[in-house]
Image (tube, rainbow, N blue to C red):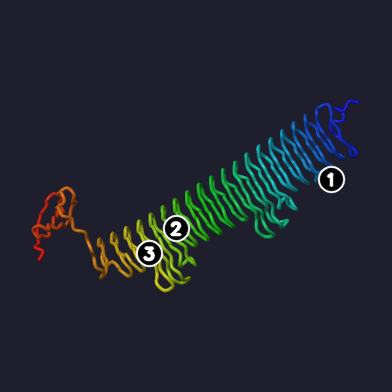
Amino acid sequence: MNLGVLNGIGRQAQSLVDEAGNVLAGEMAVATAAQGIAVGQNARAITGANAVAIGSAPTVATGPAASAVDAIAIGRTTVANAAQAVAIGSNAQAITSTQTIALGAGGSATAAPLASSQGDIAIGAALGLATAGARATGGSCVALGSGTNFGAGASATGSNALAILQGAAASGNFGIAIGSPSTASSTNTIAIGQSAAASAASAISIGVSSTSSAAQTIAIGQRAQATTGAQAIAIGGGVSATAGPLANAQGAIAIGASNATAVTGARASAADAIAIGSGDATVAGASASAADAIAIGRTASAAHSNAMAIGQGVATTTTNQVNIGAKRLHLGGPATAPADADLVASQISFWINEATGMLGFKVKYADGTTVKNGTVVVA
């Protein structure tokens, strides 16, 4: 008998190798291209050479289908219809583009994993029939995470994106979302932690409910927020959004949180402002609310531009000042005078000449050129 004439159709439960090298086992198994393998009732390895379909189903429509070169479909209603595609698990789909991989068994096509762009990998299915399983659709992306009855699996829809755990979503190109349900929704974003969200280009958000929503912002810690202005940085973990640190202006930096839901953590709310200092259960963290202001210490407040408040409870009173409040200031006293060139305009420096018992000082005028020296007797 010329088995090739059978065109790879196995009727009744049997094994068959045709002249094209196709291997069949199972009622209505179909293998129509060279070196194909179809094993199971209504399994179909068609169109492409070396296709592999394994699994049984009562109808042709629900049997596994491998329909491209080197495609592999294993499981009921699995589909692998692109070259080198691999679909394993009931209803898994590795389709449209080459080298796609879908692993996981779902009760429906919606619940099963789907990989549909070149090199995509989707692993995991959802429990609910109407809930999406893992989805990798962006090209060279990876979605790893099963869904539940109501919560979708991991979703990677940006090119070269990575999403891990239930509900994680990486929709920006080169985005990374790790955590349930973390979100990396712009180019080169990173969101790690439960409900972490990075939503602007190159933003980084690490920690539970942390938020980075402006370009190149960084939020690290539970409920840390770096928003509104590019390059803002917020570091610290708070028990609420109020308690967490907030940096919401360009280049602002806020470090520190409070220990009560209604008590404010560190706040940096003006361009290039810096607030460093945690609060506690009753007292707020540091606050820098003017451009280039710096506040260091619990409840320290720098509300004037180019001013610095250092110490617990210290507040600036005007621009261009350093205010340490009523604290003692201990400065080192070198034994020799600085060179004139070491001072910039409008600067003063001190030194101690212990041999003569004199306190020396040097000033440079605002013109940046005139330098004067003086001494004071140390009694």
SS label for mark 1: loop
Q: Quadrant of the C terminus?
A: bottom left
Question: Which residue position is annotated with label 2?
Answer: 226
- How far across and down, in percent of the image, does residue 230 sit? 42, 53
Asked if disc 3 and disc 1 are in contact, CB closer than 8 Å, the reply is: no
- How far across and down, in percent of the image, does residue 131 sit? 69, 56
**For residue 22, side relative to residue 202 (left or right):** right
Task: Give the amino acid type for the residue marked by disc 3 in the picture.
Answer: Gly
Label 2 neighbour load within 10 Å: few <14, some 14-19, many 20+? many
> At x 59% / y 54%, what residue is drawn?
168
**For residue 333, side relative to residue 124 (left or right):** left
- Is residue 349 placed above or below 32 in the rendered structure? below
Asked if disc 3 and disc 2 are in contact, CB closer than 8 Å, the reply is: no
Question: Which residue position is annotated with label 3?
Answer: 277
Label 1 neighbour load within 10 Å: few <14, some 14-19, many 20+? few
Q: Decide which of 348, 252 is in the foreground and name it.
A: 348
Give the numbered dot on residue 103: none
Label 3 neighbour load within 10 Å: few <14, some 14-19, many 20+? many
- Most extreme residue toward the bottom, as rendered? 282
Task: Give the amino acid type for the residue marked by disc 2 in the picture.
Answer: Ala
Question: Which residue position is annotated with label 1?
Answer: 59
Q: CA distance from mark 2 to mark 1?
A: 55 Å
